[in-house]
């Protein structure tokens, strides 16, 4: 087949490996910044304080109020702290929630962004910000949103609970799977997607048995970087649309919804995207969709939308919302078949 593609690289400075966090102070200085506002969720405050201490005079303050789905009210509080401590950059220490706050600040005031990544969701390498206000989630895409320097240090992920590890990694895997059949995919995004999925498939069972296995933690971070890069480069399809619908309109938890839906969306798209998905056949015996379901189940991930709190009565409206303004998808997105997908996922069936 004759290839046709466009390739646009995004600027990225990635520092990867055990001990990478020790490079943060030099990176801040090299970027011409002097006063960093540290960001974390409330639960990670103590570890964030330790990072601030290591930064010494380069740490201007700490805001430990990051929350899921980047509420605008929280961003406004953090902006006030940023101004009060006279900061000139942010250091987001955490997963997608904290990274979202750093992005929201940088989007508004142009601050340089440093990220120390501690989950596998992949937000740190995308120019996308999802934020919520008055119960509505909106998405913004802008070059200022893309973090400037990203540090991946597996030593800082040893205490990430297995459940969060599994769910955020399945979220990452979903970026890569949809990247494989994206309309605007390119040879590098597809190579990254396959290698990212391979790495996560290898690392997660080891992490589930021994969360403090540093090699497996490094392997998982490597896979999540690759999967996140795919998300930051190409468009997403049906799976992401359904996850955004269920998260935005029905309050379902982000990573868990990804974990449940991915095998069902792959089953839906399989016939239309067989060639693009073919590299994954090497990883699973039998069907790719069934294999993804078995893999998630073996790690204790949630299996059904029912257990995530969706009501049977909501399936119709969810299907209706999902086919409204659909994302491009390899197979046409139609209400009845989508309702079937949601029904299967709601029941927690193994897709074929
Ligand atoms: P998260 O950031 O919400 O973190 C989950 C929990 O794990 C938090 O309580 C956090 O404090 C804790 N935690 C994080 N790292 C830890 C560690 N090393 N040790 C112990 N506890 C730790 O979870 P997430 O899955 O990374 O992010 C989900 C959010 O990210 C969602 O809001 C989603 O919309 C967003 N997201 C955005 C993009 C994007 O490109 N914009 C991509 C993926 C996800």
Image (cartoon, rainbow, N blue to C red):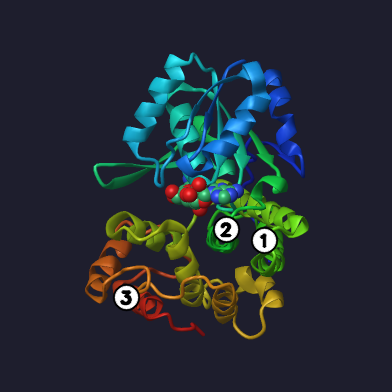
Q: Residue at x 71, y 52 (%)?
A: 222
Asked if labels 2 and 3 touch by Cβ distance under 8 angstroms, the answer is no
Q: Is residue 69 left or right of residue 86?
A: left
- In this view, 91 is above or below 170: above
Residue 161 image label: 2
Q: Bin the neighbour count of mark 1 within 10 Å (Cα to Cα): few under 14, some 14-19, many 20 and up.
A: some
Give the secondary structure at mark 2: loop
- In this view, 346 is above or below 214: below
Q: Position of residue 132 (x, y in %)?
A: 33, 43
Query: Quadrant of residue 326 in the image?
Result: bottom left
Mark 2 CB within 8 Å of ligand 1: yes
Q: Nearer the viewer, residue 9 or 216?
A: 216
Task: Write down the residue under mark 3.
Answer: 339
Q: Is residue 222 left or right of residue 88?
A: right
Q: CA distance from mark 2 to mark 1?
A: 8 Å
Q: Is residue 196 visible?
A: yes
């Amino acid at each position: 087949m004759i290839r046709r593609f466009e390739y646009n690289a995004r600027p990225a400075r990635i520092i990867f490996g055990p001990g990478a966090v020790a490079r943060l102070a030099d990176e801040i200085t090299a970027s011409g910044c002097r006063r960093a506002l540290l960001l974390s969720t409330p639960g990670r405050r103590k570890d964030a304080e330790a990072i601030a201490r290591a930064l010494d005079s380069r740490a201007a303050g700490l805001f430990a109020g990051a929350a899921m789905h980047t509420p605008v009210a929280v961003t406004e509080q953090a902006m006030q702290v940023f101004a009060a401590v006279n900061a000139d950059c942010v250091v987001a220490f955490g997963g997608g929630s904290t990274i979202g706050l750093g992005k929201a600040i940088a989007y508004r005031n142009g601050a340089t962004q440093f990220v120390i990544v501690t989950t596998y969701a992949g937000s740190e390498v995308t120019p996308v910000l999802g934020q919520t206000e008055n119960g509505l989630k909106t998405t913004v895409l802008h070059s200022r949103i893309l973090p400037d320097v990203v540090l991946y240090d597996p030593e800082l992920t040893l205490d990430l609970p297995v459940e969060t590890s599994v769910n955020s990694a399945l979220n990452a895997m979903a970026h890569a799977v949809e990247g494989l059949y994206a309309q605007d995919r390119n040879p590098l995004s597809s190579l990254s997607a396959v290698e990212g999925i391979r790495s996560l498939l290898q690392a997660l069972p080891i992490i589930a048995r021994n969360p403090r296995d540093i090699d497996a933690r490094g392997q998982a971070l490597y896979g999540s970087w690759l999967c996140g890069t795919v998300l930051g480069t190409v468009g997403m399809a049906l799976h992401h649309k359904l996850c955004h619908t269920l998260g935005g309109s029905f309050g379902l938890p982000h990573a868990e919804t990804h974990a449940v839906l991915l095998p069902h969306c792959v089953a839906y798209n399989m016939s239309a995207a067989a060639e693009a998905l073919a590299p994954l056949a090497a990883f699973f015996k039998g069907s790719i969709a069934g294999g993804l379901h078995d893999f998630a189940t073996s790690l204790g991930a949630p299996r059904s939308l029912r257990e995530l709190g969706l009501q049977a009565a909501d399936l119709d409206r969810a299907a209706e919302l999902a086919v409204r303004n659909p994302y491009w998808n390899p197979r046409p997105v139609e209400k009845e078949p989508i309702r079937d997908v949601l029904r299967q996922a709601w029941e927690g069936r193994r897709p074929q």
